[in-house]
Amino acid sequence: MKILRYIQRKLAAAGLLPESRLAYFTLLMSGIELLLILIRWMFLLFARSRPGLESTQGPLSGWIAFLTFVNAILLGAVAVRWLRNTLMWRLRNRLIVTYLFIGVIPVGLIAAMVLLGGYLIASQFAISLASYDIHTEIDGLQEANALLAGRLADAARRGVPLAQPSILQENLTALYKNFPGLQVIATFKGQTETFGARSTRPGSAPPAWIKGQYGGLVLEDDHTLHLRTVTLAPVGNDVLMVQASVPVDAKELSRIGRNLGEIILARGRIVTNEEGTQNQAVIFDMNSPEGKVRGGIVPPAVNSLDLNVPLPILQFLSPIPIKNWQTGENESLMMTATTRLSVLYQRLFSTSSDYASLIRTALAGSAIVLALIELVALIIGLRLTRTITRSVAALYRGTERVNQGDFRHRIQVKTRDQLAALETSFNSMTTSLESLIAEQKEKQRLESELAIAQEVQGQLFPRLDRQIASLEVHGVCRPARTVSGDYYDFLPLGAERLGIAIGDISGKGISAALLMATVHSAVRVYEFGGATLAAAGAAAMAAAGHKGGLATVEVSTAVSGSGSHSPSEVLWLLNRHLFHSTQPEKYATMFLGVFDGANRRLTYSNAGHLPPMILSANGELRRLDAGGTVIGLLENISYVEKSVDLHAQDLFVAYSDGVTEPENEFGEFGEARLLEILQANRQLPLARLSEMVTSAVLEWMGGAEQPDDVTLVLARVL
């Protein structure tokens, strides 16, 4: 079962698993055919021992043949459907097929037709030139032979014997230059004389079938070829017969083809009857050396496009008629000529060929077939293009509707291909855009509310830097988000008393900002609540201390003359308030101090906040770390309260972790870097000093997102 599932997964991944009814039916019919083939094979095995079973194979073979025909049609239909649904699904494949049918196939067919036609014409033209050169050679030989026969006839009339060498010496010397290997045989009154110093065999009298003038190619009984002409000249009542012959060997063919290229002649025979009709076909073997003459050299190529004509892999043959010199029977030679395109261009002239009509017919037939194929390709290409343009037009109209703000427009999907998938994606996109527009509106509403919250929170921070006669203060808060979770405040408690508060709420965003507002309100209530609230707070602290058994160390519950609480009392009350009114995971750090300008003393309590620092004019550094743990996390917590004396030009620095904890590739900004900036610029105004610190922190972060709220509170004793 695992193997079957594995095969099924592989077939499905390859797109070969049957999914349609046609595919399953084709698979069923193919299985039936295979079963019948197996049964017939089994019958063949049993038929060897039981001859009677052979008669049952006839119907079985008929059914197999019928199923083979049916399955071929079914497989073709399945293949077409698979090509349409799988291969043709992608837009790129459709464009490729369109290009093939409209552009590549017609151009390829035209190019093939042009090349094939050009090859046939060039090959025929080369053979025609070779045939023309051979006949020109025969005509020249015939003219020279006629001139020679006339002079011999004049000598015979004067009674000069044929054997006298001086008669033809002058004429033969000139003929040897044009016809190397020339042999002349003169016959007069039964006397035969052979002339030509370059003759290699003795001459013989003309055969009996020569009845008049003759010129052409002849085949001797030793299978050698010759250019031969016969001229008859009357001398009184007798006839002078002059026979001129040039052997057709490699040298002669090279001389004939000096302006063309290589020429090959191969012997063959075509037997004809008296009417001239062909009775028997003869095979010409161009590779056999028997009866074959080859001469000439293919000229060098002029350029890289100057190809051989014809190509070596496909020789073009043409027959040349010859005579058997002894019998006078008509025979045939097969000739091929190899040259260059440049030579053909130079020697281009009008000629005729036995195959000209056949070539014209072939070209006309090729043109008709090409036109039909081009028409079919154009129709297929147009149909494929139409499917593409329909989908593109639908997408264009859809984008226009979306551009006008109609996000409810949907495209009607009619096909099942990649373009249909693109249309479906467009519909999905418009649906998503419609949802995004709704979300954007909701986001804008939230941003508007956040802007209002930011404006409200801005009202909670001190609008102006408050100061008394003996103390100058300044604070700044740069939120990491729209609203901040950090808190600072300056609380006027009289003419020479000023409260300084700074805190950091756990978390960020809206929840931290709401808790920050709660802390702000509570601190102000507890600081300005008066004697009644102070007494209630003292009673609550005493009750909590007795109930929980907790000791309050250095906690003063006395109320000042102004009716405000001490810092430790405010932190204790604030801790109880946050513990009972917020979630368990919510807490805050807080530093709260009260500066008394009359005696220049700062009374403070620190609830888990980063210890503020006092930078003295003489370089002394004091940390204000007395207090307790964070507020809002545990219920009954006591806080230590402590006082420090300040001197003129002492600088008070309180900050949140957003100042010292930002990181880059060199590490954290750190407290040491903060102290370095403060020490170097402590004489500057507090606003300028605060700006330098925040700028240094932002530069340290570079382009990174601000990780936390940056809050800094500065105070200088005057």
Image: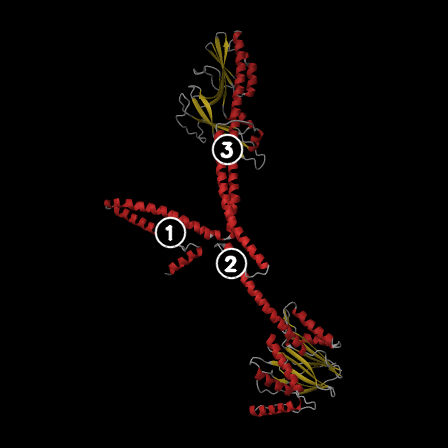
Q: Which of marks 3 and 1 is nearer the N terminus?
A: 1
Question: Disc 2 marks which residue?
Answer: 424
Question: Disc 1 marks which residue?
Answer: 26
Q: Is residue 659 visible?
A: no
Question: In terms of image quadrants, where is residue 570?
Answer: bottom right
Q: Is mark 1 on a helix, strand or loop?
A: helix
Q: In front of the other: label 3 or label 2?
A: 2
Rendered position, 121 above or below 596: above
Question: Disc 3 marks which residue?
Answer: 120
Q: Of the residues shown, which amino acid type is indicated by label 2?
A: Thr
Q: Of the residues shown, which amino acid type is indicated by label 1?
A: Thr
Q: Is residue 468 visible?
A: yes
* Cα–Cα gap, marks 1 and 2: 32 Å
In the rendered structure, the answer to whether residue 252 lies left or right of residue 589 reads: left
Q: Where's residue 591, x and y in %?
A: 65, 82
Label 2 crowd (10 A; few <14 / some 14-19 / many >=20): some
Rendered position, 314 above or below 62: above
Q: Where's residue 312, x and y in %?
A: 50, 35
- Do tag 3 and tag 1 residues touch (Cβ < 8 Å)? no
Quadrant that contains the N terminus: bottom left
